[in-house]
Image (cartoon, rainbow, N blue to C red):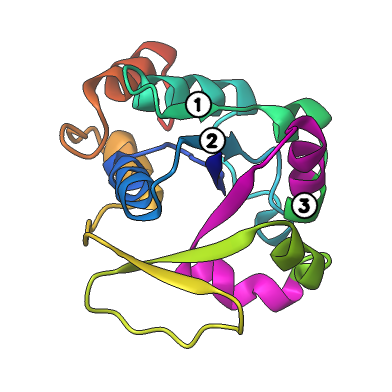
Amino acid sequence: MRIGIFGGTFDPPHIGHLLAATDACEALALDRLVFIPAAEQPLKVGMVAAPAHHRVAMVERLIAGDARFAVDALEIDRGGLSYTVDTLRVLRSRWAGDVAPFLLLGRDAVAALPKWREPEEVMSLAQVVVLTRAGESAELPAGVRALATRRVDVSSTEVRARVREGKSIRGFVPDAVATYIAAVGLYR
């Protein structure tokens, strides 16, 4: 079984996350792609705006209706700083049989990979795949695979700013995510 692991703060999850996940599923022939919202990313301490349970609920709405996708709150349930190596160890212990894990990262994350806890172990536990925008070139560490995805110029930072400014986020996030943000009053 081929499983993609897509971690992040997802604060909020947006259409770029969904399209990158779709591209990865298709290009890597993944049987499943698991979104894993971070409790607290060590390199982004204090930068998360929405509480963890809201971020999980938004990811659930982002992926609703696509059986290839799942959300796993294991980092949030564990609490504290979210180290990828710990998450991969937990996932590997859960999975029995022949599983090929693919850790999906953005270019910014792979650039910080040497600063991660046990980066060599991360790379031994999963095939690291960097999601790049079509046409971008990247200098990648040995053993890291690049996967071109479509260019989507949207970010969680922009979505939060638009909500704060009272602007529409239609098209930036699925309607179910926008409805959740409005109903809960996030990012105001």
State the residue position of label 1.
70
Three-letter code for the amino acid on which mark 3 is drawn: Tyr
Mark found first going from the N terminus, 2 or 1: 2
Residue 123: image location, x then y, percent = 70, 67
Label 3 to label 1: alpha-carbon separation: 20 Å
Residue found at x 21% / y 34%: 169
Label 3 to label 2: alpha-carbon separation: 16 Å
Residue 34 badge: 2
Three-letter code for the amino acid on which mark 2 is drawn: Val
Three-letter code for the amino acid on which mark 1 is drawn: Ala
Q: Do callouts 2 and 1 mark residues in contact (Cβ within 8 Å)?
A: yes
**Residue 121 horizontal side relative to residue 105, left or right:** right
State the residue position of label 3.
83
Q: Do callouts 3 and 2 mark residues in contact (Cβ within 8 Å)?
A: no
Tell which tag, 3 or 1, sits nearer the viewer: 1
Tell which tag, 3 or 2, sits nearer the viewer: 2
Q: Do callouts 3 and 1 mark residues in contact (Cβ within 8 Å)?
A: no
> Dot 3 lies on which element?
loop
Q: Which residues are magenta?
A: 87-115
Mark found first going from the N terminus, 3 or 1: 1
Question: Does the magenta-highlighted stretch encompass residue 105?
Answer: yes
Say if 182 sits above or below 4 in the image. above
Residue 105: image location, x then y, percent = 51, 60
**Residue 136 horizontal side relative to residue 141, left or right:** left
Label 2 to label 1: alpha-carbon separation: 5 Å
> Dot 2 lies on which element?
strand
Residue 82 in sight in this render: no
Residue found at x 57% / y 77%: 111
Question: Does the magenta-highlighted stretch encompass residue 109?
Answer: yes
